[in-house]
Image (cartoon, coloured by chain):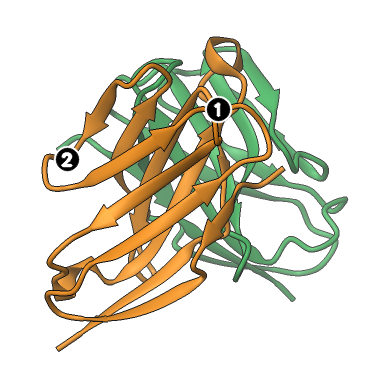
Amino acid sequence: DGGITQSPKYLFRKEGQNVTLSCEQNLNHDAMYWYRQDPGQGLRLIYYSQIVNDFQKGDIAEGYSVSREKKESFPLTVTSAQKNPTAFYLCASSLGQYYNEQFFGPGTRLTVL
Amino acid sequence: QQPVQSPQAVILREGEDAVINCSSSKALYSVHWYRQKHGEAPVFLMILLKGGEQKGHEKISASFNEKKQQSSLYLTASQLSYSGTYFCGTDTLGTGGGNKLTFGTGTQLKVEL
């Protein structure tokens, strides 16, 4: 079955540590996205990528980094520079760049202790 | 800037209708609607494009007023399964933006017996 997988579902880290969230898709989608979701604030775009080896900052990129070495994979690193990293992180992908629905993964809930 | 959604929350009895509004301070090229159930990933409902084209589920109805920079989602004869949080995502960059969406803070909808 085609879809988007994110792992792990729950992640705990100590303050000051970098952590990488995994996102893999087998939908053959060109575009991939990372969103952060906090209670009452909806979805906020962190980074997005339209093609392999290229990505752009979203609205809240500070303290995060990404890579897009393969079409199927778009990992997100939450660095120690992110001041408030505890949140629910959603990865999504879409078929093309423009006017296509985004398919979301199940999300990773990150808690920094 | 995030689009503004109204109402923030609504409770319906099964069979009643509801309208969810999404308003932007910028000109819109497209509006995307998603529904998220608690603890799950958002699911695509509809895309409305500048010029009148729509893509989405047949049972979902929505409108897009380009001049007013607004979109409305119409839920008729509501069912228990309609419960969830509804998000609108706005595209203010057009084809140059790579499907970059800015999401509203959501409308919580609860359908009761």
Q: Give neighbour class at mark 2: few <14, some 14-19, many 20+ (Cα, 10 Å).
A: few
Q: Quadrant of residue B112?
A: bottom left
Secondary element at tag 1: loop
Residue B32 x %, y %: 41, 38
Residue occupying image coordinates x 53% and y 11%: B95
Q: Amino acid at mark 1?
A: Leu
Q: Residue furthest bottom?
A: B113
Which is more toward the observer, A30 or B9? B9
Question: Chain ID for label 2?
Answer: B
* Residue behind mark 1: B28
How many marks can you see? 2
Which is more toward the observer, B8 or B96? B8
Residue B70 x %, y %: 50, 41
Residue A84 x %, y %: 79, 63
* Residue behind mark 2: B57
Q: Which mark is residue A28?
A: none
Q: Which of the image's four quarters has the C terminus of chain B?
A: bottom left
Q: Is residue B89 left or right of residue B84?
A: right
Which is more toward the observer, B17 or A63? B17
Q: Are marks 2 and 1 on the same chain?
A: yes
Secondary element at tag 2: loop
Residue occupying image coordinates x 74% and y 76%: A113
Q: Is residue B90 left or right of residue B2?
A: left
* Label 2 vs 1, first from the N-terminus: 1
Residue occupying image coordinates x 63% and y 62%: A41
Chain letter for green? Answer: A
Distance, label 2 to label 1, CA atoms, is 21 Å
Chain B's colour is orange
Q: Amino acid at mark 2?
A: His
Question: Chain ID for label 1?
Answer: B
Q: Is residue B77 left or right of residue A29?
A: left
Residue A105 in sight here:
no
